[in-house]
Amino acid sequence: MIYQRSSQLFAEAEKVIPGGVNSPVRAFKGVGGTPLFAKSAKGAYLYDEDDNRLIDYINSWGPMILGHAYQPVVDAVIEKAKKGTSFGMPTELETKIAELAIAMVPNIDKIRFVNSGTEACMSAIRLARAYTKKDKIIKFSGCYHGHSDSFLIAAGSGLSTFGVPNSPGVTQGTAKDTLLAHYNDIENVKALFEANLNEIAAVIIEPVAGNMGCVPPKEGFLQALKEVCHNHNALLIFDEVMTGFRLAKGGAQELYGVNADIACFGKVIGGGLPVGAFAAREEIMNFLAPLGPVYQAGTLSGNPLAMAAGYAMLQALNSDVAIYDRLEAKTAYLHQGIEKVLKANNIVFTINRVGSMISVHFDANPVVDFQTAKNGDNDTFKKFFHGMLHEGVYIAPSAYETWFITDALTYEDLDITIEAVNKVAKTL
Ligand code: PMP
């Protein structure tokens, strides 16, 4: 495979954009080499600037559940664009998509649209703090909730360790209000609550983690979390930026039968346009300005193009009764296929999967939290990544990411992928 034009474009980009990219993980830092530049995409395939065709398992980091350039989304955006691209005024479509999202997701009365997952999570914790009149939040090591200051906190050691900023520019003042817990460890969460009595406003979690590879919640963990939050008058925030509208119509809340107090959504809603949202019961959402005291705003929030894309996307997901079964079946097929060939090639691995989120960890032990996710053999992953790329299969350029399966993938694509894994495994 030739990456000549991508390499040239990257060299040019590096002169004018820090690191040549507008979001760091795109830069292939974790795996080495230069990133591919996308030219176009359709369905399950991505075409780079050297005209290589790749089977895409990143799918814009999740949103393309129905494949790239999904026609109803494209048509909706084109039609809307002809009528103006932004008004800074309310539009009817915002109410329609809100009604639809509320009908699909359990346990929410009102929703507010923003422009990214970062904004959704950032606004959700502000709202939780105001609602509970407390300052601290608990997040889990290895969970990513966007790049706002409160969430850029590295894993500290010990139960009651205050967060340490893992990016310069995040002040100690902000970091001290973010407490870190171990994913899937309810005793750890309880201990944090005990050590910070009446100080914790909320626990925020990826109900299925997707940012340390895919890490499912242990049986009963989310329910227990809900109970602990309830006992301490803290809110439970589900960051469903990856899981929302993907694992089920109603996301992880529906899949696990656990009601969060606030749910955050992101990219999936926009079908590839910049959209996020957060939603909750009425008494919580009514704390937001202009009804309540919590300020939250956005010139481009509810943008007509984004809403048109989102409405087309949600309508498609809502009206296709078999979509989630198909996604499950395709991902299970891929899961079994990869498992078989990796075993046959004596590779040490663990596969984690929930619905259409799946990840391959190069470690024999169960991956249940950030610590165990970090045990994966990164050198093997790097070789695996480049080998797969060479075979025309594009997975995320980091061992800490999830593969996202789209309905546009055919079983033939899945077979090609499994055979690619087989070939690459022989080189590891
Ligand atoms: N939460 C989760 C779970 C995410 O995966 C992401 C992004 N990958 C975000 C929040 C932030 O979303 P955005 O990049 O749209 O700001």
Image (cartoon, helix red, strand yellow):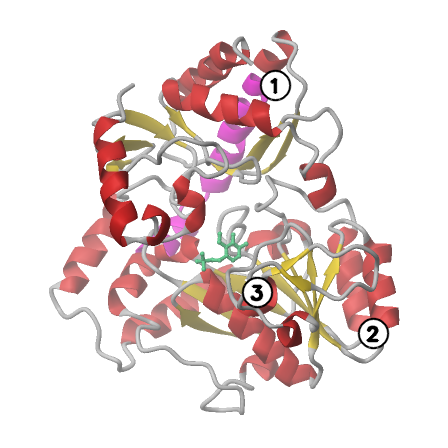
Q: Residue at x 71, y 46 (%)?
A: 217
Residue assigned mark 3: 263
- The N terminus is located in which quarter? top left
Residue 76 tag number = none
* Dominant SS type (magenta): helix
Q: How much space separates mark 2 and mark 1, taking CA atoms? A: 44 Å
148 to the left or right of 46: right
Expressed as whole percent of the image width and height from the top left, the position of residue 111 reads 48, 72
The local secondary structure at tag 3 comes to strand
Q: How much space separates mark 2 and mark 3, taking CA atoms? A: 24 Å
* Precedes in sequence: disc 2 or disc 1: 2
The local secondary structure at tag 2 comes to loop
Between 306 and 6, the one lying in front of the other is: 6
296 to the left or right of 73: right
In the rendered view, would you say 188 is above or below 280? above
Expressed as whole percent of the image width and height from the top left, the position of residue 234 reads 74, 74
Q: Which mark lies nearer to you, 2 or 3?
A: 2
Outermost residue, left side = 82
159 to the left or right of 417: right
In the rendered view, would you say 418 is above or below 71? above
In the rendered view, would you say 360 is above or below 274? above
Residue assigned mark 1: 339
Between 133 and 386, the one lying in front of the other is: 386
Which residues fall within the magenta stretch?
Answer: 312-339
Between 104 and 392, the one lying in front of the other is: 392
Q: Quadrant of residue 45?
A: top left
Q: Residue at x 83, y 69 (%)?
A: 193
Expressed as whole percent of the image width and height from the top left, the position of residue 381 reads 55, 26
Residue 196 tag number = 2
